[in-house]
Structure formats: C-alpha cells, structure tokens
Amino acid sequence: MYLESLSLKHFRSYDILQTSFSPKSNLILGKNGAGKSNILEAVYLLSTSKSFRNTIDQRMVKWGEDGFHYIWLNKNTAWTWRDIYRDELTVLELVEQAHEINSPVFTEVVTQVVRELLLLHSSDWQFLISTWSARDYAEMRFANHHSAIGRLVEIANRVRENDSLSDADKFYLEEMKKRDHPFPELSLEWLADLPEIKKADH
C-alpha cells in the first residue's frame, strides 16, 4: 500500500496543498520553514490519527486565513452566528427588564438564560464544525443551548405576567440549572455596565 496523493486545507503553514507521490521513492525539498515537516506530519497523522509532534490538535489548524477568521466564520458556521446575534438581542432585553421588574423569580430565570448564552458563545462549536473533528456533536450541543434559550425566554415572559413558575416551568428550569450550570455565582448586576444596558437606563 502506498499514498497516491495528499490534499491539505488550513493545515499548519498551508492554506491549500495538493500533491501526489510516486510508488517508489519521494524527495521533499525546500528551504527551512517551507513546510516540509508539515507534509510528513500530515502523512503520519493520516496513518496513525496522531501527530509525531508534542502538540495539541488546535495547533495543526491554520488560523486566520487571509487575515480572516475562517475557522469561526465560513459557509458551514454562518448559521450559528445568526442564532447567536438574535439570542444576544433577546437576552439583553430580558436583562434590562430584570433590572426594572426586580422579581427574584424572573431574575432566576434570566440568569439561566445568560448561562445558556455564554455556553452558546463558546468558539469550540465553530472550531469543531469547521475542522470536522466532532461536527455532529458540536451542532447538537449548539442547537441544545439555542433551544434552551428559546424555552427559557418563553418561561421568563410568563413569569413577567404572573411572577410565579408553573410546575412544568419550574421542573424545566431546575433541569437546565443541573445540566448547564457554569459560573454558579453569576449575577445580572455584572451586566449592568454594558453600554446597551446603560443606554436603556437613560
């Protein structure tokens, strides 16, 4: 068995590389830093699923193609940013309302919405989608957090009207707090100095 060809995209120093190999001997020539070892590493990675360098996977990805953040924004990840931007606007409105209403129940729900937004913001999702290293997992996790924001916003709207949680809403909120509970000390007061919040207060 021999390797007939190799195609690289955003790997180490290469934007794009397409090359073929002889079934006999192959000689790779180039100046220092030209990327000869990167080709060998790619072949080794293809054969063994690991790098011969002592490195983390992210360092094998070429970041910032042409001065642009390709890994985070491309045709495969654009849909995530549309959801993020819409959710950001919704969450900012809820935080403003929480400062005005001053309801402990409403604040509890909105605080969990903010946690879900922070998790939605994780750049790991776009990285995993773009590199195909765990695309299905990343898309599922992103969709779960986006869906949780939508459900919690609905609950917050009901709490704003009644200042109480139904049994079903309380159960869902508790489940989300168990599942997604980074920053347990998170306070909406931390967001009070955001320009959008301060502008609304004036």
Image: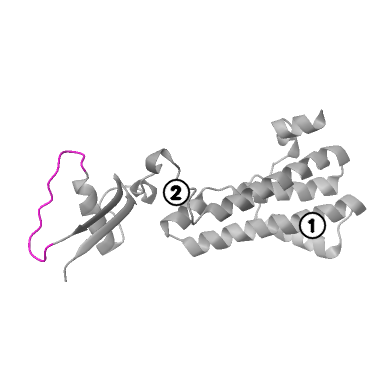
Residue with the mark numbered 2: 71
Whole-percent x and y of residue 103?
Answer: 87, 44
**Farthest residue in the top direction?**
202
Q: Is residue 50 magenta?
A: no
- Secondary-structure class at tag 1: helix
Quarter of the image for residue 88 reads: top right
Q: Is residue 30 magenta?
A: yes
- The amino acid type found where label 2 is placed reads Ile
Left or right, 160 with reference to 194: right
For the N terminus, the image quarter is bottom left
Left or right, 112 with reference to 74: right
Tell me if label 1 and label 2 are in contact, CB under 8 Å. Answer: no
Q: Residue at the location (82% across, 42% down)?
A: 97
For the C terminus, the image quarter is top right
Q: Which of the two labelled residues, at mark 1 and mark 2, occupies the earlier sequence position? A: 2
Q: Circle 1: is it few (<14), some (14-19), or many (20+) Cα within 10 Å?
A: few
Q: Residue at the location (41% across, 56% down)?
A: 131
Residue with the mark numbered 1: 154
Q: Nearer the viewer, mark 1 or mark 2?
A: 2
- Mainly helix, strand or loop, the magenta region? loop
- The amino acid type found where label 1 is placed reads Glu
- Secondary-structure class at tag 2: loop
Left or right, 65 with reference to 146: left
Q: Residue at the location (25% across, 63% down)?
A: 47
Whole-percent x and y of residue 73?
Answer: 49, 48
Whole-percent x and y of residue 194?
Answer: 70, 32
Relative depth, front residue between 58 and 157: 157
Write the start and end of the magenta stretch as one range. 22-34
Q: Is residue 179 visible?
A: no
Q: Residue at the location (22% across, 52% down)?
A: 39
